[in-house]
Amino acid sequence: MQQLLSCLLLFFSLSSWAQPGYLELKRQLETEQEQFRLNLQELKISRSPNQIFQLDQYNGSKNAMETMIEVFERNSALLDRYPSLYPNNQKKMDEVLEMLIYYVQAAEFLGQVLPHRALATVLSELSSQRENSFLLRLINRTQFHLRPHGNNSGQRLHKAILRAQSWPIRSHPDWLRQYIRRAQYFSSNSSLLDDRYFVDRPFLDFFYDLKAGLLYQTGLAALPKDFYITHEQINEIQDSLHPGDIAVIKHYYKLTNVAFNGEWSHGLIYLGSWNKFKRYFDKDRNTREFFQNLCRRQNLSCNNFSSFLEHKLPEVIDYYKNDKTEYFGQRLPRVVLESIGEGVVISNIYEALRKDQLALIRPKMSIQAKALAVYTALQYMFRPYDYSFNFQSHHRLVCTEIIYNAYSPGVHSTIPSFAWERSRRLGRVVVQATDIVRTFSRDFQQGGRLFDFLYFLSGDSREKKATFSSPEKLQETVTP
């Protein structure tokens, strides 16, 4: 190794630095790395481990990481390259430099992502979607070459780094000295490349699948009884509901209630039938003009919100407007967006709302802003239910996660910040149905700036029925 470094440094002292291979790799990786840093900075992602990703932050970080991964994959042949300890020509010396550049940049990329729980979640999803788990190999081999432990061959770069500290390199380019310093930094601060999240991934996936299966079965199970809310009560309220209204429910005696805190266990978004949906959004002038302009900018042949959705989400809208549901021999339209055991679906009014207790609230915002929120929610259609309650990921979604993501200022500047209350579930920070009611209660006490109260059907287990009640009584369900 000492001869290797001596030859390398002698070469740099005599060379004109005209070889393009490693310099082109250096330029490419440094440019992408700087852009990645700027992208994360623009997303304003908090370093707090409890920070829940907004949808734009999730999508932005995912796109930025995918770009970085593609750059590393294009140069992945360097992962299997082991330079000779005694390079006797310029080509082999170039290979030493390429490896140093590649692994330092890889370490900086991983060191920027892995300590952040939300970013690590996105990175894990991207890794699981790629054949042969390129990212896992990148992590392992980056550590293999840079960390100061492991077998002898695994310390090639580390030994070269240590030797370089005592060698006079003043006459060599600044960037080479900086790369050696950065390589030593990652070598001595191995905690920055903590890969336990990925090493444990197969075990986590096994227990996730096991837990998902068990919760799915208990989700289908409840003590046999009729619901407290009647068909007549649902009929009474449904005509006054608007697309975008938020509902929370409680199904008494369902086994999965043990997984939730508080009085409420499920949240959903009312859409209405497709015809009602179209009338509500397409008749609003501001909404129509907004999507006319958006269609024009995206070169789409549409002129309102409903036709915009038909272009952007054709499978979802076809399912929404054409696929009826079966309910006790009746074929009913799909009107309520929710995430249940089968995943994100649009259910009929009775299946979704006719339970034991129900509250309905309406976000105070323009119809245009509501359209953008609903568009965000519809993009989650057909994704599986998230039994692990991971709000950092949008690959699987729990019911209230759809509400949180849709009604977020990250979707568009016209959507107000509701500052949703939060809880801990399975060790993670989440927004549960009870938190939605707590948010409404807080806002109601402050004068109702964010929500309008619509209905509260309070379930009485002794009377075995639900009765219409007041917003004050709704607040009592979340009062300690």
Image (spheres, rainbow, N blue to C red):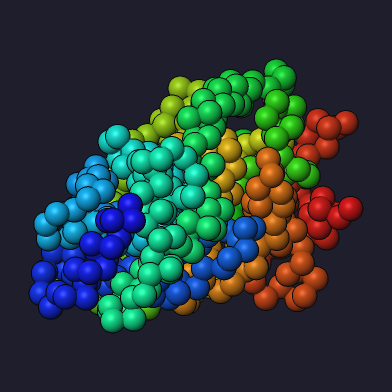
Residue 198 position, x and y percent, is: 48, 40
Quarter of the image for residue 464 reads: top right
- Residue 76 location (% of width, % of height): 23, 48
* Residue 350 shows up from this direction: no
Q: Is residue 336 left or right of residue 279?
A: right
The residue located at (74%, 32%) in the rendering is: 258
Q: Is residue 470 above or below residue 396?
A: below
Work out whether 266 lies above or below 181: above
Residue at coordinates 44% horizontally, 60% vertically from top-left? Answer: 162
**Residue 283, image x, y percentages:** 36, 69
- Residue 9 in the image: above or below residue 173: above
Outermost residue, top side = 224
Q: Quadrant of residue 27?
A: bottom left
How many labels sit on residues? 0
Q: Nearer the viewer, residue 398 or 75?
A: 75
Whether residue 198 is visible here, answered yes or no, is: yes
The quarter holding residue 34 reads bottom left
Considering depth in this image, is 455 or 424 the residue closer to the camera?
424
Which residue appears at 43% of the width and 76% of the height?
Answer: 42
Image coordinates for residue 14, horizontal then vertical, percent: 16, 75
198, 425: nearer the viewer: 198
In-front residue for pair 143/304: 143
From the viewer's perspective, tell me whether residue 201 is left or right of residue 266.
Answer: left
- Identified at 57% across, 35% down, the residue is 387
